[in-house]
Amino acid sequence: MIIRGNISLKKYNSFGLDYKTRYLVQTKTEKEAAALFNGTIHLKGPILIMGGGSNLLFTGDYIGAIIVPGFKGIKTEEVSDEFAIISAGAGILWDNLVEWSVSKGYGGLENLSLIPGLVGAAPVQNIGAYGVETKETIVKVKTISTHDGSIRFFTNDECGFGYRSSIFKNSEKGNFLVTRVYFRLKVNPIPDLAYGTLKDEIVKLGEPSLKLIRQAVINIRRSKLPDPAVIGNAGSFFKNPVVESAVADNLKKRFPGLPCYNNRPGSIKLAAGWMIDQCGWKGKRIGDAGVHEKQALVLVNYGKATGKEIFDISEKIKLSVFEKFGIPLEREVEII
């Protein structure tokens, strides 16, 4: 375990914001992590569990301890004629896991290629892209209680997955540290090409395969989304709002170009990026904070923006969308 004090968070958050934390704790084993919560080690202030820092917006220094999990290792737990159960440590880069699973011929994660962050964030956020969410493949999640250091497994049902959410983000927020995630993947996968732009990209590349789907997703993401190493950002800043079908029908009458996607029965998912664009925000910049020129869902730090300045733009965007469409936007990025 490594504990450091008064550390800059600039390289630990994808917005590249130069705030500090009282303590930065990096754990490599579950035993080390348990020691933080069972009374063996005492740290002042609140505790924040952070993965790759790709879904956070800091607005100032953090007065407590930030824990960064370093649990490693990917392995195949069991294999049948239809499925493979694999597990990965919470500290593994998510895209490394996707690349590994594709190389093994295990299907289910390929549509989630190039999503930034660590494996431990996958069940917390229920990350998703191109018609796929991690809830569809997660079998169980191994955790450590932040109250007493005990180990607990959560089944898929117990995780309470929702759209970009889970109990780890809601009712049990801060109560558990994810250490390992177990996935059930297909040994003989059928490509999921339901998402329009993905299907179009596959046609350009050739016959669908796991590797080709992964490459197609990478191509699309790189063409639309800025690289955090070049321009500070946290990917999609807002969730796509889900509304009742009747609400969507009324909006379509007023705004015929509004993209809508089928959701659960009786509800429709709206394209937040399109609405933000219609409000004139795409490519708009205020100082060093702004909205990306190619994707209105992405807020960016062009160099010296503060977290407060980025937050303020997000508030103005929410107000604009509500005034024009009557739809409240919810941030996907967590404000610290």
Image (cartoon, grey):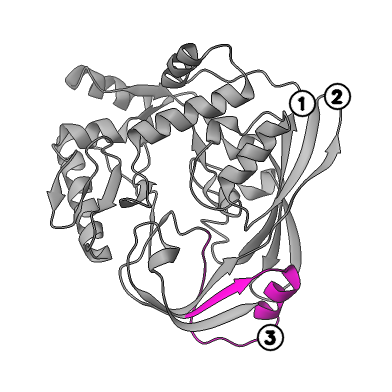
Query: Which residue position is annotated with label 2?
Result: 81
Q: Is residue 116 visible?
A: yes
Q: Quadrant of the C terminus?
A: bottom left
Q: In this view, does 54 lie to the left or right of 305?
A: right
Label 2 element class:
loop
Which of discs 3 and 1 lies nearer the camera? The answer is: 1
Rounded to the nearest angstrom, the CA distance separating label 1 from label 2 is 7 Å
The reply to whether discs 2 and 3 touch (Cβ–Cβ < 8 Å) is: no
Amino acid type of the residue tagged 1 in the rendering:
Val
Q: Which of marks 2 and 3 is in front?
A: 2
Cα–Cα span, label 3 and label 1: 44 Å
Q: Which mark is residue 187?
A: 1
Extent of the magenta region: 23-51
Give yes or no for residue 172 being in the magenta stretch. Answer: no
For residue 177, what is the image quadrant?
bottom right
Residue type pointed to by label 3:
Gly
Residue at which label 3 appears: 39
In percent of the image, x 46 and y 26: which residue is there?
Answer: 263
Which image quadrant: the N terminus?
Answer: bottom right
Q: Residues within 10 Å of mark 2 (few under 14, many from 20)?
A: few
**Up/down of 335 relative to 100, above or below:** below
